[in-house]
Amino acid sequence: MKTEKLLPDPGSWIENIIQNFIENSLENSLKNEANEPAWEEALVGFCSGSDPIFESYKEHVGQFHFTPAEIFNLTFPESPAEPEELSVICWILPQREATKSDNRREKIYPSERWARARIYGEKVNVKLRKHVVATLQDAGYEAVAPMLSPQWEMKKSERFSIASTWSERHAAYASGLGTFGLCEGLITPRGKAMRTGSVVAHIQIPPTPRPYTDHPAYCLFFKKGSCGECISRCPVGAITEAGHDKLKCLSHLRLTTADYVKSHYHFDGYGCGLCQTKVPCESGIPEGTLTS
Ligand code: SF4
Ligand code: SF4
């Protein structure tokens, strides 16, 4: 077993690893002609593996949703850890202004930049997850990216139609990075137009404070009974006052837009994100939600 590198401030060390990757890695690319970066500077947050919120996700998401200790110990059965010895590392990758601006103009299909962010940008996110895991392991700390684990899978959910064994948005909520909107997107201090990633590691990092107590704290619809702009942005009626119809959304996203992306942008991909752009929560926490 490797000796762990002593880290006086593991939170800052990990945050620097993530920021350096996004800022300096040639991987951060939309793979378009201009080779534009896919993502802006990341937001990073942490929570403890023993945070009781993960037990509550078993009630809220489904019994199949892993706690950090479950996914860690399934990955490392030879060196299991107690929940309190683990931390969940989460990040938000905000969309760039050019990508959001293009998508604001769209009414049915994604803009090219948005579709590229969905496909090539997510590949960047996969590489970032692997980079964080590899850097931790080089320093002597076992780590797993749940989304890249063979244990990760989609499940049928009574409440949500479909759900998965690890939700990165729920991990980010637990790590103080944002709250849910009517459309089920995570509204972060840099808005809802973003992607998120997470790693569970055998390292103790002080948790990021959660500046909210309820899951829709930053959504105007839930807090003020106003807005609902994501409802009209959805081209297929997948968002109503009752919430988000995942199956309707997925059918548009994975089937309809795939044909469009192939025939118009000439790569294999898909995307939508119309409900994430041209809405008050696109690029930040909407004004008015933080006051009672
Ligand atoms: S657009 Fe409005 S209703 Fe929809 S998630 Fe954002 S704040 Fe909530
Ligand atoms: S991603 Fe597109 S299809 Fe899905 S809810 Fe948002 S606007 Fe509707």
Image (cartoon, grey):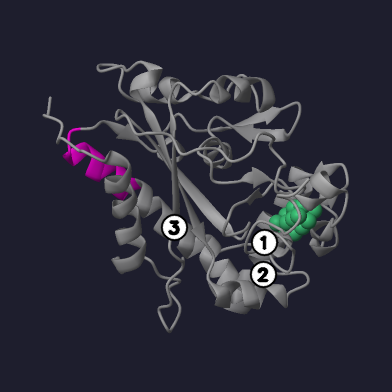
Which is in the foreground here, disc 1 or disc 2? 1
Q: Which residues are magenta?
A: 130-140
* Residue 138 lies within the magenta run: yes
Choose the circle earlier in sequence order: 3 or 1.
3
Q: Are marks 1 and 2 in contact (CB under 8 Å)?
A: yes
> What is the number of the mark on residue 273?
1
Residue 208 in view (yes/no): yes
Q: Quadrant of the N terminus?
A: top left
Looking at the image, residue 30 sits to the left or right of residue 174; the answer is left
Q: Which residue is mark 3?
A: 42
Residue 73: x percent and y percent? 36, 19
Determine whether the residue tagged by mark 2 lies in a helix, strand or loop: loop
Looking at the image, residue 153 sits to the left or right of residue 15; the answer is right
Kind of residue at badge 2: Pro
Q: Residue at x 37, y 25 (%)?
A: 72
Vertical side of 228 occupied by 209: above or below: above
Which is in the foreground here, disc 3 or disc 2? 3
Q: Residue at x 21, y 38 (%)?
A: 8
